Image: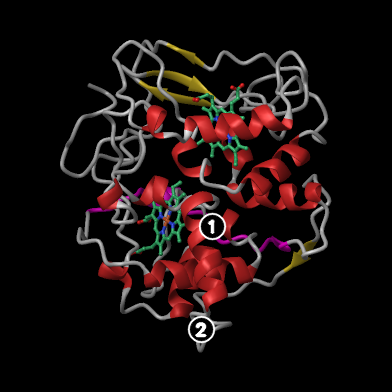
Amino acid sequence: MRCGLILVAIFAVTAGAATPDLVLEATPERLARGEYLVNNVVDCAGCHSQRDVSKFNVPTLPARRHGGGLLFRDVCDTCFTPNITPYALAEWTDAEFLAAVTEGVRPDGSKLSARMPYLAFAQIDREDIYAIIVYLRSIPPVAGGPYPRDFATDYVPDFVPTGVMRRPEDDATEVERGAYLVGIAGCNGCHVGPPGSAVAGIALAGGREFAFPGRGLHRAANLTSDVRSGIGAWTRESFVARFKAMGSPAVQDAAWKPGEPSSVMPWWFYAGMTESDLGAIWAYLATVPAVEHMVVKWEPLAGPMPLINWVDIAGNASAAR
Ligand code: HEC
Ligand code: HEC
C-alpha cells in the first residue's frame, strides 16, 4: 500500500469472539466524529439507502437514509441491502455490530456477502469504526424491512486478516491526513485501474466502469497528478471548489435528463467534508505519481451489463428503464 500509512497487523478473530464484552461509550467526541464520517467520508448510506434515480447524481432519498432496500440486481433479483438503523439493529450488541462491519459475520454466525466491504472497513482505525457504530446506533430508526437478501453464497470469501490504517495524530502533516482520508473514504475502490487494462490495479489511475443501461457507461476519472489525463493541472482551490459546487442544491436538485450524462461520483456525500479535509485530500493526491491514462468518463451505453441497478424496493424508477 502506498502513502506511508502505518500498517499494524491484527490477528484473525471469529464472530466478535475477541471482544464479546465490548461496550462502546457514546461520548460526545465519538458521536461528533461518527456523524462527520458517516455523512461525509465513509459511505454506508450509498449502499444502505434507497436512491433518487430521478436526479442527476442519484443521491439517497433523505427520509430513507440507512434504511436499506437498495437492490443489487447484478447479483440477484432479490438482493437488497439491510436496514442498519436502530429500527433493525437495536437488539444487536456493540460486539455484534463490530463483527458485522469488520469481519462480515452476523450474530447467528452466518457470513455477509463481500458486497458489504468489511475487508476494507477492517482496515479503518478502530476508534473511527467505534465512532461510526456509536453514531449509527444514535440515529432515529427508519422503518423498513426486513428485505429479502439472497446474495449468492459463492460471493462469500473467507475473512482475511489484514492491517489497519492509523488515524493521523494532531500534529500529522496535511499529506498524511489526506492519505488517511483517501484510504478510509475508499476513493481507490472506484478510481483504480480496471482489470485487463493497461493500468490494471494501479491506484487512482481511473477507468473502472459503471454500466447503467439507458443511463450510460461511466468511468472513474484518473486522479493521479498527470497533467493531461489526470488532475495535475487542477489547483487546490479548483479541487475543493469542484466538490462544493457539485454538492450544491443547484446540482443536487437537478433532474436527470434521459440521453444526457449523470454522475456516479458520490458528490452528494463527499461534498460535506470540511475544506481543510478536502484540501488534505488534494495535498495527498498531488503526491501520487503521474500515470498517463486518458479516461472517457461517460458515453451512452449499448448492451445490458448493470453493476448496480438503482432500483429500489418499491420498484421505483429504474436505471434500466
Ligand atoms: C458497497 C455497498 C456497501 C457499503 C458501502 C456498506 N455496506 Fe453494509 N452491507 C452491504 C450488503 C450488500 C449487505 C448484506 C450482505 C448480505 O446479506 O450477505 C450489508 C450488510 C451490513 C450489515 C449487516 C446487517 C444485517 O442485518 O445482517 C451491517 C451491520 C452493515 N452492512 C453495516 C454497514 C456500515 C456501518 C457501513 C459503512 C461503514 C456499510 N455497511 C457500508 C453493502 C454495503
Ligand atoms: C462509487 C465510485 C466512486 C467513488 C467511491 C469515488 N469516485 Fe470520484 N468519480 C467516480 C466516477 C465514475 C467519476 C467520473 C465522473 C462522474 O461519473 O461524475 C468520478 C470523478 C471524480 C472527480 C472528477 C475528475 C474529473 O476529471 O472531472 C474527482 C476529483 C473525484 N472523482 C475524486 C474522488 C475522491 C477524492 C474520492 C474519495 C473521497 C472519490 N472520487 C470517490 C466514481 C467514484
| Image quadrant in which the C terminus is located | top left
- Residue type (three-letter) at the residue carrying disc 1: Leu
Left or right, 225 with reference to 197: right
**Does the segment drawn in magenta span residue 160?**
yes
| Residue on which the image places disc 2 | 25
Q: Is residue 244 magenta?
A: no
What is the count of numbered marks? 2
Q: Quadrant of ligand 1?
A: bottom left
Q: Quadrant of residue 204?
A: top right
Q: Which mark is residue 37?
A: 1
Horizontal and vertical percent position of residue 210: 46, 26
Does residue 277 sit above or below 288 in this rendering?
below
Q: Residues within 10 Å of mark 1 (few under 14, many from 20)?
A: many
Q: Residue 144: which numbered mark, if any?
A: none
The residue at 53%/43% (across/down) is: 270
Q: Residue at x 62, y 16 (%)?
A: 295
Q: Amino acid at mark 2?
A: Glu
* Lateral position of residue 163 relative to residue 210, left or right: right
Depth order, front residue of 184/1: 184
